[in-house]
């Protein structure tokens, strides 16, 4: 059923097996009564006590001095009529005022889930139990209609929200602010706010703080979701951790400016919101037009952060990502970026490709530098024709060579950008975002093409399409290496200029829809200087993301930990690169680098043609081993066990779909002398007895050095057991007492322990 409408009480109960969400009405207003663990509704309505409002709380209903919008829990709060908290929307009408007074007209229930025109959203497949509630509200003065959509996905245990404003009047209105979701927790501020902060090469670092009585804004104003914050925000009970406790989260299916507000008022009620940032945003809504806000995916779990993450992982993997590759194992790739940067020749690429093929790598990716005049980041973007001084035989030459070597060929693009030193810019100086008469601020020596323009979108669809059509290319890395400034368009009238950033995102989605639809068999990976646009909007078009330009194995544990809260591991790409590492100069073993990348979507980014024999043999074993476990890793269930943010070690467990194999990835930071061994409870192993193996590829003291073979030596458990060769341990023991790791032998060590049910 999923949605119960009680017309008499004007109350709606949205529910899945585990979650309830209750909307009621009070004096024509929509109120938010409950979101959390599944409940049976009591008779009385509204669910929340509506108390007499205290002094200094104005009353919009002159007949009722006890009633103020400032103290009632609201579902989509307006502006200027006594609610002083953060509004859900704001509309300027023709007389310059911003007051609307929407009154509930109807609750309508339907099966399935509507698409949101021009925007990505989670979808439904036959057999899914999904229902939609449409709440229609009207403002008599402006003739604006507001439709709030709630899609209850019982199969995946999520509720999604978006709003649609329709101008049914005769005059234009200006939408100044239009969030997708707002929820008030009545008299409840017992939350920690968790968000994912960062910067380039340091994306999605876990941040947690008590909310207190204050207002927090997590946002991006950069024109893309960005490195600095991620559009996924959580409110959790103070004792909640990965393993247990309650958490409420909102995840925005959008790739541009966003805001998430958490605001606690003086009466301890908490407002939690998500939507497009109103920073430099406006939308002119002419008579007859509609504006659609993007989708917010709301997940409640009382099974800790892991419980919440599993819901997102499954939903995003199966009902957000689309296309040929959704259910396919992803190829192991070699990308030449860190091996060569801009200086490569056909011969060099062939040497790397040859070595990669011998090692068993499946896809060769040619990164930046293959086109135009592109010997550094100072020129060439926009000129998407091959640089024949580097590649004498053209792109076809490299592609054919790789294909001959039985490898797929992939190509890097940065389609949204233009270098001032490029033919494209010389020909179309107006095609970039800019404000007339002002300096065009550059980032990485480049400007941003104005994707709000249809002619620019069409040009990109055409040039990228032509290249994909004329070569054997099976993968595209779609990069984006700066954030927006002067976000205005030469084509738009003055009153439409503040629409540019949202129009840009709509344009980007149009381009990606066209290309990914035509090139169904091309695997698209999104990238923005690493993980600067790692969001659910991009995943709808491109089912994997380059998680970070930081390829250092120690740093990556933080990035993987943070990213995994919202995004499934199959979408997260991680490459084994050179040591010392190019971003941190840190030395880590090939083994540690290997395990860090194998827990997600494995690739390489080093010069394979110059590897020592020993390293080459080890890489070969890594590749063979990853192929043997990739189905389990990419489609299994990912658990965070130990947080690198809470100590000097981290642990991640992957459970195979059939719950027969468990992969525990364990990493330590600095070694110390004279330490005791540590025991890690594994908590999640399904009932049974397990054979335990420590995996090695040959560079550690435990290794056998045999191809893809695991070493069973050096396993310690509690209570002290000296010889566990072939040991079989019951899950009850491992889950409760844990698995004990002996003192590691050096800094930055990684281990992979595999538990196989016997
Ligand atoms: C940034 C990406 O994240 C890198 O992997 C690489 O593709 C460079 N851009 C190329 O300019």
Image (cartoon, grey):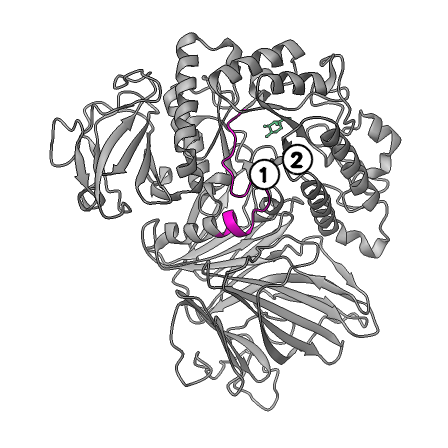
Q: Are marks 2 and 1 in contact (CB under 8 Å)?
A: yes
The answer to which image quadrant residue 460 occupies is: top right
> Would you say residue 317 sits in the magenta stretch?
yes
Q: Residues within 10 Å of mark 1 (few under 14, many from 20)?
A: many
Magenta segment boundaries in residue numbering: 315-333
Residue at 55% x, 57% y is 125
Q: Is residue 228 magenta?
A: no
Q: Residue 181: image x %, image y %? A: 57, 63
On the question of residue 554 being in view, the answer is no
Q: Main secondary structure of the magenta part?
A: loop
Foreground of the two, 400 or 621: 400
Q: Residue at x 60, y 61 (%)?
A: 180
Q: Quadrant of the C terminus?
A: top left
Q: Is 559 displayed left or right of 500 in the figure?
A: left
Q: List x then y, in percent, for residue 116.
A: 66, 59
Q: Residue at x 39, y 30 (%)?
A: 628
Mark found first going from the N terminus, 2 or 1: 2
Disc 2: which residue: 480
Q: Is residue 467 left or right of residue 589?
A: right
Distance of mark 2 from mark 1, alpha carbons?
8 Å
Residue 582 drawn at (x, y percent): 51, 20
Residue farthest along the right direction in this orientation: 427
**Which residue is disc 1 drawn over?**
532
Front-most of residues 92 and 685: 685
Task: Answer with the quadrant where ligand 1 appears in the image.
Answer: top right
């Amino acid at each position: 059923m999923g949605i119960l409408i009680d017309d008499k009480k004007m109350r709606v109960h949205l529910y899945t097996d585990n979650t309830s969400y209750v909307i009621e009405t009070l004096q024509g207003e929509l109120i938010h009564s409950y979101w959390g663990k599944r409940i049976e509704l009591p008779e009385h309505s509204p669910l929340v006590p509506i108390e007499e409002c205290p002094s200094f709380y104005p009353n919009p209903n002159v007949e009722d001095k006890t009633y103020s919008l400032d103290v009632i829990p609201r579902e989509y709060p307006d502006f200027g009529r006594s609610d002083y908290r953060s509004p859900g929307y704001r509309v300027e009408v023709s007389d310059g005022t911003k007051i609307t007074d929407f009154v509930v007209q109807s609750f309508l229930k339907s099966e399935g889930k509507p698409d949101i025109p021009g925007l990505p959203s989670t979808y439904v497949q036959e057999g899914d139990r999904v229902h939609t509630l449409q709440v229609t509200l009207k403002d008599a003065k402006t003739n604006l209609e507001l439709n709030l959509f709630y899609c209850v996905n019982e199969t995946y245990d999520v509720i999604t929200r978006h709003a649609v404003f329709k101008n049914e009047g005769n005059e234009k209105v200006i939408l100044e602010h239009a969030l997708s979701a707002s929820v008030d927790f009545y008299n409840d501020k017992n939350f920690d706010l968790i968000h994912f902060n960062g910067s380039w090469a340091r994306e999605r670092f876990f941040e947690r703080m008590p909310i207190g009585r204050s207002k927090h804004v997590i946002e991006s104003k950069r024109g893309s979701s960005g490195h600095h914050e991620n559009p996924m925000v959580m409110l959790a009970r103070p004792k909640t951790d990965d393993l247990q406790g309650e958490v409420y989260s909102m995840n925005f299916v959008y790739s541009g400016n966003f805001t998430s507000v958490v605001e606690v008022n003086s009466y301890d009620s908490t407002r939690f919101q998500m939507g497009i940032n109103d920073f430099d945003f406006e939308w002119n809504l002419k008579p007859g037009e509609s504006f659609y806000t993007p989708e917010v995916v709301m997940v409640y779990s009382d099974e800790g952060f892991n419980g919440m993450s599993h819901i997102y992982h499954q939903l995003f993997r199966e009902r957000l990502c689309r296309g040929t590759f959704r259910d396919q194992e992803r190829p192991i790739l070699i990308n030449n970026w860190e091996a060569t940067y801009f200086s490569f020749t056909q011969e060099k690429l062939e040497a790397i490709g040859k070595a990669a093929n011998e090692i068993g790598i499946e896809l060769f990716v040619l990164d930046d530098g293959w086109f135009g005049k592109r010997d550094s980041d100072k020129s060439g973007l926009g000129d998407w024709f091959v640089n024949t001084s580097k590649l004498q035989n053209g792109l076809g030459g490299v592609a054919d060579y790789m294909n001959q070597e039985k490898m797929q060929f992939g190509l890097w693009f940065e389609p949204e950008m233009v270098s001032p030193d490029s033919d494209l810019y010389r020909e179309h100086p107006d095609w970039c975002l800019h404000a007339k008469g002002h300096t065009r601020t550059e980032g990485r020596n480049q400007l941003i093409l104005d994707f709000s323009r249809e002619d620019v979108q069409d040009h990109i669809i055409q040039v990228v399409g032509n290249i994909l059509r004329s070569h054997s290319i099976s993968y595209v890395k779609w990069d984006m290496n700066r954030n927006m400034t002067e976000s205005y368009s030469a084509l738009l009238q003055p009153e439409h200029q503040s629409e540019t950033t949202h129009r840009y995102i709509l344009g980007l989605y149009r381009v990606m829809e066209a290309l990914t639809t035509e090139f169904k068999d091309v695997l698209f990976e999104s990238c923005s200087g690493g993980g600067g646009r790692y969001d659910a909007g991009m995943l709808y078009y491109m089912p994997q993301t380059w998680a970070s330009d930081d390829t250092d194995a120690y740093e990556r544990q933080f990035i993987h930990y943070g990213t995994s809260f919202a995004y499934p591991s199959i979408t997260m790409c991680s490459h084994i690169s050179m040591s010392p590492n190019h971003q941190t100069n840190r030395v880590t073993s090939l083994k540690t680098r290997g395990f860090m990348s194998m827990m997600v979507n494995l690739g390489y980014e080093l010069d394979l043609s110059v590897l020592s024999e020993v390293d080459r043999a080890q890489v070969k074993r890594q590749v063979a081993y990853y192929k043997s476990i990739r189905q389990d890793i990419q489609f299994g269930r990912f658990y965070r066990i130990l947080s690198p943010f809470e100590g000097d070690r981290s642990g991640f467990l992957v459970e195979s779909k059939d719950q027969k194999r468990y992969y525990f990835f364990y990493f330590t930071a600095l070694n110390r002398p004279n330490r005791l061994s540590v025991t890690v409870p594994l908590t999640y192993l399904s009932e049974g007895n397990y054979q335990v193996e420590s995996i090695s590829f040959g560079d550690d003291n435990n290794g056998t050095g045999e191809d893809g073979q695991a070493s069973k030596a050096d396993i310690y458990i509690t209570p002290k057991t000296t010889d566990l060769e072939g040991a079989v341990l019951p899950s009850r023991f491992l889950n409760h007492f844990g698995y004990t790791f002996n003192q590691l032998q050096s800094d930055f060590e990684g281990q992979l322990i595999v538990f196989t049910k016997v």
